[in-house]
Amino acid sequence: MLIRRRRRLRSLNKRTGRRQAHTLDMLRRRTAEEDDRYHAQRTAMICEYYGTRRVPRFLWVNNRTSAWWEMVVPTYTNVQWIKDFRMSKCSFQLLCMRLEATLGRRNTNYRECVPVPKKIAIALWKLATNSEYRTISHLFGVGRSTVCCCVQEFCSAVVTLLLPEFMPWPNSEKLEEMALYFEGRWGVLQCVGAVDGSHIPILRPEEYHNEYFNRKGWHSVILQGVVDGKGLFWSVFVGLPGSMHDSRVFSLSSLVSCVDRGGLLPHVTKNIGGHDVGYYILGDSAYPLQRWLMKPFQGRLTPQQHVYNRKTSRARVVVENAFGRLKGRWRCLMKRNDCNMDNIKIQVAACCVLHNLCERRGDEYREEWTALPATQLDGPAPDIVEDRTIQVKY
């Protein structure tokens, strides 16, 4: 009997233990489900709270007015548009369409993004006037840092996306077309371009500032450009210090390496006076004589050499006129640029691309934009001599 009782007690203890374990397991499951349900509800409430909560705008941006851009600019005529933005409204819309994917941004909960047309208009205003960021900020109703970002993004997008289209390296058909235009317009055979350099004023750099001090008495970087007979750039090289000679800039430019690799098609020749002459470009006396670069005769000249110099000089004036129209339309190239060196290079290249775009589309160029004659565009920048005098005095 005692053994039976012990067995029954053990069996009862086992059943009781199983029941207790099952009860504890069910309690743990219910507790876990309630915890999950509680956390889910709590998370949903937090998300709903932060989703409906609005952050006051004055904590993030200043209240600025863009009434001029939103109310006045839409009433502009085409003449007013060209006068203020240096290009026609159709060309402006083309820029907006081509750069929409690159410059477009999305709105956030804290602020609205700057629309692409407004961003391009800000950049064009800066390039056309070289106004201070503060002035442009008040005009368009954006922050000064936003103006700087708009200009940099726009110039980078223009150089990246539009330079291959509006400033491509000429192929065989284009070289033949340029040679025929030079022959018909200027009476020069086999010529496909004219090369020259121009100084872009800059502020005194922090490092190596003596190298950027040019012979005219101010700091600058050199823009070397090659244009066709219509005044369109097809090769630009910018960024070297203003103290360098034009021949040194020419030897360091990418133009020389491209031509040496057969860029001007040396096998395409034309018999002129019993000589097979290939394509070539014209330069002034500062450039070295090459088989594909012609320069004026110097010294005591024969009558034939005088005629040659007169004809080539008349054809070479196309590059001087191109620089005049470039700086007249984008006046940031005529005034001292306050950007760092990398941004200056991109801005100058973007202005050359925009020059080609406007000239190719036939946008009006107003003569009053050229404040100085084309031959004086590289004269001393305003107030630079006075600034130097003040520095020496004190």
Image: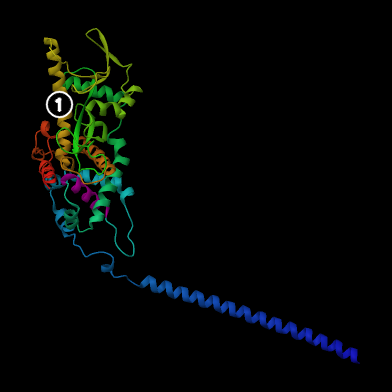
Residue plotted at (30% across, 22% down): 264
Q: What amino acid type is highlighted by mark number 1?
A: Val
Q: How is the image coloured?
A: rainbow
Residue 33's x, y, as percent? 58, 77
Residue 392's x, y, as percent? 13, 44
Which quarter of the figure is the N terminus placed in?
bottom right
Predominant SS of the magenta segment: helix
Residue 293's x, y, as percent? 25, 20
In the shown orientation, is residue 79 left or right of residue 60? left
Q: Residue furthest right?
A: 1
Image height check: is 46 above or below 238?
below
Q: Residue furthest top?
A: 274
In the shown orientation, is residue 317 left or right of residue 265? left
Q: Residue furthest bottom?
A: 1
Residue plotted at (29% across, 42% down): 342
Q: Which residues are magenta?
A: 115-129
Residue 38's x, y, as percent? 51, 78
Kindly indicate the quadrant of the structure image that contains residue 358.
Answer: top left
Magenta residue check for 128? yes
Helix, strand or loop under label 1? helix
Disc 1 crowd rating (10 Å Cα; few below 14, some 14-19, many 20+) is some
Kindly indicate the quadrant of the structure image that contains residue 219.
Answer: top left
Magenta residue check for 137? no
Mark 1 highlights which residue? Answer: 317
Number of marks present in the image shown: 1
